[in-house]
Image (cartoon, rainbow, N blue to C red):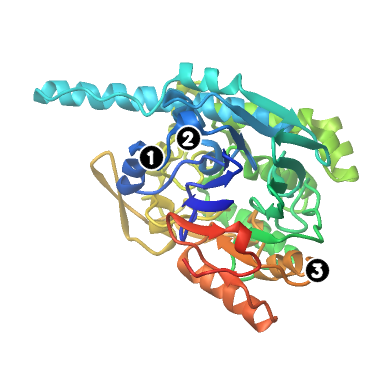
Amino acid sequence: MKLIFHGAAREVTGSLHLLEIAGRRVLVDCGLFQGGLEHERANARPFPFDPAEIDAVILTHAHIDHSGRLPLLYRRGFRGKVFAHEATIDLAAIMLRDAAYVNEKDAEKESLHRLRRGDEPVAPLYTVADAEACLSQFVPLKYGETVQALEGVKLRFQDAGHILGSCIVELWLQEGGVKRKLVFSGDLGHSGVPLLRHPAVIASADLVICEATYGDRCHRNWDETVAELGEIFRTAQQAKGNILIPAFAIGRTQELLHFFGEHWREWGMDRWQIFLDSPLAIKATAIYARHWALYEKEDGSRVRQTRFRLPNLHFSETAEQSRALNERHSGAIIIAGSGMCTGGRIRHHLRHHLWKAGTHLVFVGFQAEGTTGRAIVDGASTIELWGETIRVAAKVHTVGGLSAHADQRELMDWLGHFRDRPPVALVHGERNALDGLAAKLAEAGWSQVVIPGPAGAIDLAALPYLKAQ
């Protein structure tokens, strides 16, 4: 009985955890590494196990750093079930098809360059056909529903409050006479975030696998965050420029639209034309509207009535509609992916607007190391886009209070509900965040905390004792 960490181990992306129990092999998540060229190479490498020998996958939520290698797993031989919340399946369907399409187009472009040089073409990481085939293996579950996933593996999802359909995973394992309960936090939500419910409280576990994205810091409170956003809109209007918001298509975009409606008059939103420039985000917004019953009661009623629609909201679905935004020199709020500026339409808008002093660039989510967004947040004076150097003259804002991740205080509060301080493995964080949360846990009297490295393993039969990996 063993747990092996093959992704999101001492880094934020690539969530991939392997359970070996009673001759069965189960994955919790199968996400893409995100960041620079080295991360792209890591995605293409062989899995550290035979995909054909994986019996099942348990998916915590649809974000691509948790789901994005599922079609690749299928391509390389996996044929088991993928257990996920029903809303996660709806979101994963558009996310994985979109990722596959991008893979195909990127491979097509790269192959053309290679052929011109006399080199061999490249294959996409996976195809749309792989994504479609993988999606046929999904098994929908509801919150609170307990199922026997495999012999010796019982599963229940609880609401993680991170994005629509995000899950805390409770697993009851049995091998011979040994029984263990594992709890995977998934990505825990930031309390008070619009729409979503608070992360569910869990009381018992033999081992908790907890994310630590913001393990070393606390977010600004919501009142300050709302005031900060309002001030950005007022300042930007005076500058007579545009506002660019790189936003994750799933979660952050819908929260922003909800905020715009709530603070319509206060923020002077009627003075702007708002453009949602992302086909993926447009589809995701429709899914968010359809699952209104999963939200806090008041928010759910509002979404049911408005479907996130605003009087001055425009959906830019086509490439032509997106390019037309380049001619808008002021008065536009452009929400576009990707959230870390690693791809998508936001890069085109950066090319046309980042060098203008009247532009305001608003980051509303975490920026991983190695991404273009992180470089800008860290103060880069220029960035490179398609071989062109672009000056960063725009006013850059980082609104940390909008994060969809729990901060250190909230992580400690969630962990504090477990009886008897069970062993904890910290994942999904950069080193400072992991160390910061580990130190905080030690101060609070937790004696068994480990930060697993890549391929680090925990002998579940030996619990409650942990070895540093």
In the image, which is nearer the foreground, mark 3 or mark 2? 3
Kindly state the secondary structure of the residue where label 1 is placed.
helix
173 or 85, nearer to the observer: 173
Can residue 136 be seen by looking at this rendering? yes
Q: Position of residue 318 (x, y in %)?
A: 50, 21
Sequence-wise, which precedes: disc 2 or disc 1? 1
Which of the 4 quarters of the picture holds residue 249? top right
Q: Are marks 3 and 2 in contact (CB under 8 Å)?
A: no
> Residue at (63%, 41%) from the top-left corner?
253
Q: Position of residue 240 (x, y in %)?
A: 53, 49
> Which residue matches tag 1?
43
Seen in the picture, residue 35 relative to 164 is either above or below; the reply is below
Q: Which mark is residue 419?
A: 3
Kindly state the secondary structure of the residue where label 3 is placed.
loop
Q: Position of residue 56 (x, y in %)?
A: 60, 33
Kindly state the secondary structure of the residue where label 2 is placed.
loop
> Residue at (83%, 41%) from the top-left corner?
144
379 or 239, nearer to the observer: 379
Which of the 4 quarters of the picture holds residue 55? top right
Q: Are marks 2 and 1 in contact (CB under 8 Å)?
A: yes
Q: Amino acid at mark 2?
A: Arg
> Which residue matches tag 2?
69
Q: CA distance from mark 3 to mark 1?
A: 38 Å
Q: CA distance from mark 3 to mark 2?
A: 35 Å
Q: With 285 as the anchor, is 277 left or right in this view?
A: left
Q: Amino acid at mark 3?
A: Arg
> Residue at (61%, 19%) from the top-left corner?
136
Q: Amino acid at mark 1?
A: Asn
Sequence-wise, which precedes: disc 3 or disc 2? 2
